[in-house]
Image (tube, rainbow, N blue to C red):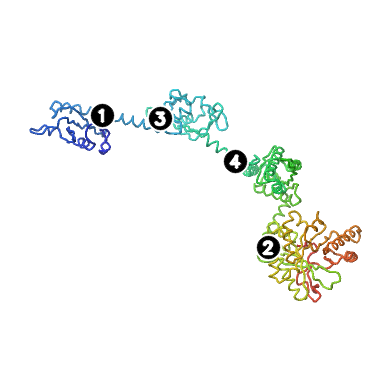
Amino acid sequence: MLAHQTQDRPGELRDTSFPGDAATLWNALEAGVPTWIAADGTLCPDHFAQRDGAALPAPGSILALPLRTDAGFHVLLLIAGAAAPLCPEVRDHLRWIQPSLGQGAQRALLAWTLQRREEQGRHIINALDEALALCTEDGTIRQANGPALQLAGLEQVEDLPNIFDPGWHLHDPDGRRLEPSQYPAFTALQTGQAVRDVLVRRHLPGSVQWMSMNAVPWQHDDGRRGVIVSVKDVTEPHLLRQQLELQAQQDELTGLPNRRMFNQAVQALTTRREGGAVLLLDLDRFKLVNDTYGHHIGDALLQVIARRLQHQVQDGLCSRLAGDEFGVVLPGVTAQAARELVSHLLPLLEQPVSLRGVTLHPQVSIGLCATTDPDWEADAWFKGADLALHDAKQQGRSRWSEYTDVLERQHARRVAIEERLRLTLQSGGLTVEYQPIERQGQPGWLDVEALARWEDAELGCVSPTEFIPVAEEAGLMTLLGEQVLRAALTQVHDWSQVTGHPVRVHVNVSGGEMKNPDFARRVSRILRETGCEPAQLITELTESEAVGDVQPVLRQLNALQALGVRIALDDFGTGHSSLSMLEQLPVDSVKIDRSFVQNVDATPRRRSLLSAMLRMGEELGVQVIVEGVETAVERQVLDTLGVQFVQGYQVSRPVPATGLSAGPHGLTLAPVARPLARNSRNV
């Protein structure tokens, strides 16, 4: 028997168990009358065979009887072995049973279609990775796929426990056991709404399984209700996500919370509005540890500091922010309590530590920002602690400092100075003033020191004590120093043309400039461009800027000396290694600091020191210049000691180039000179 829908084409017919191809059967169906089908596919309607003299169907022909159904199905009944043509009794009988045959065929086809779809559905469900179970209203599992059976460790659906059975051992993500009334299936049945992507933990012997559960309610037309539950094992991706989240929140080296968690904790201070304190800690000279002993020792030191910090701070969050910088957030503490903690914490952090045979003495600088002001924003907390940390380092490191309004004003001033200084350097707005250096018995001056001066349209007259440190921190000293050097050499070249004698200029050089490998080449280029001889330039370097990493400085000084430029050691006697600097550096002259000149007339010990320095300079072949000479009495004592070169207000205050007149004997003060304030610092 063959059945198909009216819209089917011949190639889609469902049965080919009888002779004939699909087209032949389709033609027999469309004929609409009993038709004989020969073995070769020839069709012969039965009513043709009834006519007198008509050719009978070939032996072995099959009778095809089309049947119609109420559901729009067409059925073709194939009868083998019937005698052709049909006798009237058989034709009448077939006509009488035709409706019943059609209905029966319809039911058979529907049952076959349903069975096939159910089989397809089972194949699809079993192919899913998710465990799937069809449950009744009371929780009985009626159907389940293979993954569901594997999840339960069973082989038969009938053996599966009730979906609400506590034996499933379900817990919420925090580990709290779920009651059956908290199961997603129960919620779906109670609310009539789908429950999706519920993360639960299933506790098994020796392990924990993470699962994502969905529950979708269903209801038949007859009123029966139930729920479809799907479960997916997400243990591996969940644990991976937890690990990634931990890495996103935790510093890998120390195990402390990272900057992200620190920022969240600071933000929480603002949200709670109950005040507190924020600390920023920095290991001083940590790079030296890494460079000297290796990064493995540096890492071990960071781990020790982290443990000490965490041990001492019980009611707050300790975090490693980056490199050698740590942060602490103390919610709700008073400023006094925070000060006491920092005072107690600093010496404990700086206790010596032995690491792999190396004994280290860590030094820590700490910035503290504490307030009970509820209106502080997160940025203000961090900025305040950072300013305090910067202040602690400027004061000499290995100490702590607390944020105050004064630090805020100083910071604002520094920012303004840096901003305006950049603009000034871009436009070449710095000026240079000159302070003569007098040689005993010489009628005019042939040596001057160049001093950078800055008067800004917005900030007014800015002292070098302010803008020079800012320029050094902001990386502007190279540009600033080059502008001063060019202006000074240009000026002394002009003076030399008038006097007929080479006028020499002392120019201060910072340690940062001197450590630049291109410094000597830049000096050589500017000498050529200004037309000055190298011997007309004396570069001054303070011993405090030369100590530390001496080798880069020494290379540049040797290169300068090879050019013919002379080297002077400024502020001699004020550092910790003056004599060693004379031995290490190619120094042509030293400038004795003013601290040895003050009250020299009333201090015999100071006169003895000056006398010894003069003899030492003479023995070493080093020219000695005494600076900071301000009174006639001081000058008289120096003359008695045989000092040849002096510099200070007693000779002349710093003046602009127009304040000096060039003559045949050298430079002298012009009739009208505008000296600078007495406390201006040399640059």
**Which structural element holds mark 1?**
helix
User: Which residue lies under the disc numbered 4?
Assistant: 247
| Amino acid, disc 4 | Gln
Closer to us: mark 2 or mark 1?
2
Closer to us: mark 4 or mark 1?
4
Q: Quadrant of the C terminus?
A: bottom right
User: Which residue lies under the disc numbered 1?
Assistant: 105
The crowding category of the residue bearing disc 4, from other C-alpha atoms within 10 Å (few below 14, some 14 to 19, many at least 20), is some
**Which structural element holds mark 3?**
strand
Q: Where is residue 593 drawn, in percent x and y?
A: 82, 60
Instruction: Give the label on residue 219, or none.
Output: 3
**Which structural element holds mark 2?**
helix
Front-most of residues 491 and 468: 491
CA separation, marks 2 and 1?
Answer: 101 Å
| Amino acid, disc 3 | Gln
Q: Place residue 244 in its image quadrant.
A: top right
The crowding category of the residue bearing disc 2, from other C-alpha atoms within 10 Å (few below 14, some 14 to 19, many at least 20), is some
Q: Is residue 281 above or below residue 178?
A: below
Dot placed on the residue nearer the N-terminal end, 4 or 1: 1
| Amino acid, disc 1 | Ala
> Are the residues at dot 2 and dot 3 in contact (C-beta closer than 8 Å)?
no
| Residue drawn at the location 78% of the way across and 57% of the way down | 584
CA separation, marks 2 and 3?
Answer: 83 Å
CA separation, marks 4 and 1?
Answer: 67 Å
Q: Where is residue 376 drawn, in percent x and y?
A: 66, 47
| Amino acid, disc 2 | Leu
User: Which residue lies under the disc numbered 2?
Assistant: 479
